[in-house]
Amino acid sequence: MELRFYDTFSRDKRTFKPLDPNIVRMYVCGPTVYDFAHIGNARPVIVFDVLFRLLRHLYGADHVTYVRNITDVDDKINDRACRDFPELPLNEAIRKVTEITDKQFHEDVDALGALRPTVEPRATEHIAEMRVIIEKLVAGGFAYVAEDHVLFSPQAMNTANTLLPRYGSLSNRSLDEMIAGARVDVAPYKRDATDFVLWKPSKPGEPSWPSPAGIKAEGRPGWHIECSAMSWKHLGEQFDIHGGGIDLVFPHHENELAQSCCAFHENRMANFWMHNGFLQVEGEKMSKSLGNFITIRDLLADWPGEVLRLSMLKTHYRSPIDWTLKSVEESAKTLDDWYRFAADVRGGEPAGVVIEALADDLNTPQMIAALHGLRNSARSEADRGALASSLRLIGFLGESAEQWESRKRSASGIDVAKIEALIAERTAARARKDFGESDRIRDELAAIGVVIKDSKDGTTWEVAR
Ligand code: AMP
Ligand code: ZN
């Protein structure tokens, strides 16, 4: 099976082959842990989980390493710690914030059906690797020390040997334009406006570590160096896929690429750079001030995670996605049908049409069309098995049909005993041919959101969404 992915660096769709035939290596930038994750943050989690599952299916579960980091050192974390735990020393307060947020994040993404990555490294546990890379960059003339900061110089990179990619090539910007467009209030210790921070001094009370490059004062890392260090530690100097949201292309990924290539004298960091498009809500950019900011947690209160997962996959990962209630409602109906039709079937192999759609740059809209095709043309137990197995491969049908239904019932606050008593009364009414009473009970059930279906085997019911 030929795999083809769009690569942001080369700006085309290329055939994918692992650099090391024995192991596929993927790194995705993870969350900064200071608050509940929003539904936009769920997009890279779900998209790269589908990719992880596809790669495991094709290469074997033991032949894929997926690293998604946790950024646990950041100004936003420090601010939140001061706000939420003013009585604690800052370092303790920070630990509390990161622990709580980390737990919330995992609960949320588990509920979305995302597999845990192979490794989830934390930035604060990789300071030693960051120091090594920073030292290499200073020794190679790509970085310099100024006022207890270490700064990376894109100019130095672009005037060095030709093996290195040019700074700006990932985001398709020229350094000259960046210099021309730079802000006027550039920090005085920078030689050039485009220089960026690898290491900076910590303010009193802030987390701090011994500094690299002969700096006496303790300090802390910049954001970009964290990912160069964690990907190096867990995947090596070069690896197959680097992912994240499109907003990370510049400056974060451009800078990661610069750091890693210059430190290791390589012409590339990742063979493929994959970026998901942005998510907006009901046609508007999601923001706290517009009041349309939705956390994963809010949505999980109303919907099973698989419904949110399906809604996310209806749009191709590189396109912008408009998150709407209508689409979520439709996804719920689709899943109700798939659960009823296929959830209790075991065995079977994922269908070729589903894998082929995913192999073509994760074409999930085409994959969903293929799933509908399988559903509608299924005639035999084997057909249902192919549908069920395809759905499980991509993270659906995590529960039985019965669990799915009963969750829906309990989520809608419905009194199951009362419904079953009403259905029994209605069955009795029908038996004595009292159709007036039987219709009345049907209406009473409909009024509380319960739809009943009669068949030769008796009456079944479900909650209308
Ligand atoms: P952050 O915690 O803001 O660094 O974001 C974590 C991940 O979520 C990154 O890969 C971002 O690119 C991604 N992300 C943030 N906001 C959105 C959004 N509205 N739509 C899609 N992806 C997003
Ligand atoms: Zn990163």
Image (spheres, rainbow, N blue to C red):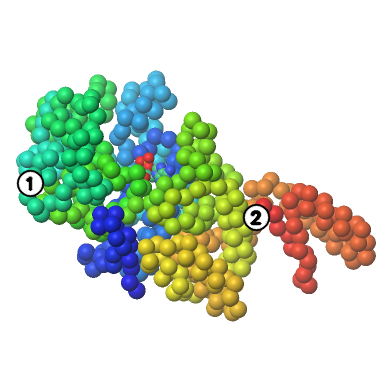
Dot 1 or dot 2, earlier in sequence: 1
Residue 399 in view in this figure:
yes
Task: Please tell me which residue is depicted at 13% across the width and 34% down the height of the picture.
Answer: 212
- Residue identified by numbered label 2: 406
Classed neighbour count for the residue bearing mark 2: other residues with Cα under 10 Å, few (<14), some (14–19), many (≥20): some
Residue 73 picture quarter? top left
- Residue identified by numbered label 1: 160
Q: Is residue 68 left or right of residue 463?
A: left
Where is residue 401 shown, x and y percent of the image? 61, 62
Task: Please tell me which residue is depicted at 29% across the width and 46% down the height of the picture.
Answer: 249
Residue 462 picture quarter? bottom right
Label 1 to label 2: alpha-carbon separation: 64 Å
Q: Is residue 228 left or right of residue 401?
A: left
Q: Is residue 336 left or right of residue 294?
A: right
Residue 130 in view in this figure:
no
Discs 1/2, front:
1
Task: Identify the element where label 2 is drawn.
Answer: helix
Quadrant location, the N terminus? bottom left
Task: Please tell me which residue is depicted at 24% across the width and 29% down the height of the picture.
Answer: 183
Q: How many marks?
A: 2
Classed neighbour count for the residue bearing mark 1: other residues with Cα under 10 Å, few (<14), some (14–19), many (≥20): some
**Disc 2 residue lies near ligand 1 with CB under 8 A:** no
Of residues 204 and 330, the one nearer the viewer is 330
Q: Amino acid at mark 1?
A: Ala
Residue 45, above or below 34:
below
Task: Identify the element where label 1 is drawn.
Answer: loop
Where is residue 362 shown, x and y percent of the image? 40, 62
Of residues 80 and 163, the one nearer the viewer is 163
Residue 60, above or below 271:
below
Q: Amino acid at mark 2?
A: Ser
Task: Please tell me which residue is depicted at 32% across the width and 37% down the height of the picture.
Answer: 72
Where is residue 346 shown, x and y percent of the image? 53, 71
